[in-house]
Amino acid sequence: MLTTAKRLREKLQTTCLYAASNSDRHLDSFLETYRDLESHGGHMSEPEAIGLFLDNIHDPDYYSWKTAIKLHKLSLDEHILQFCERADDINATQTNRKRL
């Protein structure tokens, strides 16, 4: 179990969102790996998970959002919800650009 937890922790550290990446896939991968880590006894504190989640977002469309969200003391679930709202805004903007 220790080896699996170590592998899952490493996967979490390399799960990143880049420009033109799918935000839903990124979120699903992060949450699935985080839950697997917890179920294998590889504890990661919530603040550590939040920091890792935010630090691994490398898409420039999220830079100002990341700066603003770091100022709030939110739970991981609240960060996820805010991320989903921001992703929806970005996707809507990109869809509108394509229509024009």
Image (cartoon, grey):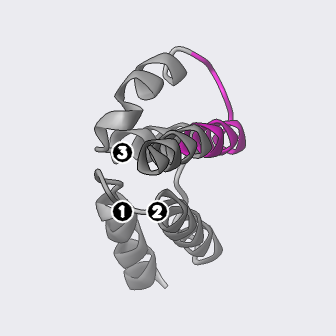
Task: Say which residue appears at 66% left-offset and 28% top-offset.
Answer: 74
* Pointer 1 residue: 15
Q: Say which element carries label 1.
A: loop
* Pointer 3 residue: 57
Is residue 77 covered in magenta?
Answer: yes
Q: Which residues are magenta?
A: 72-87
Is residue 51 covered in magenta?
Answer: no
Give left or right: position of 14 versus 91: left
The correct choice, above or below, for 23 with respect to 75 in the image is: below
Q: Amino acid at mark 2?
A: His
Give how far apart the Cα atoms at labels 3 and 2 are: 9 Å
Quadrant where the C terminus sits is top left
Q: Residues within 10 Å of mark 1 (few under 14, many from 20)?
A: some
Closer to the chain start, of discs 2 and 1, is 1
Q: Amino acid at mark 3?
A: Ile
Image location of residue 44, percent across then percent down: 52, 54
Task: Say which residue appears at 29% left-offset and 62% top-offset.
Answer: 14
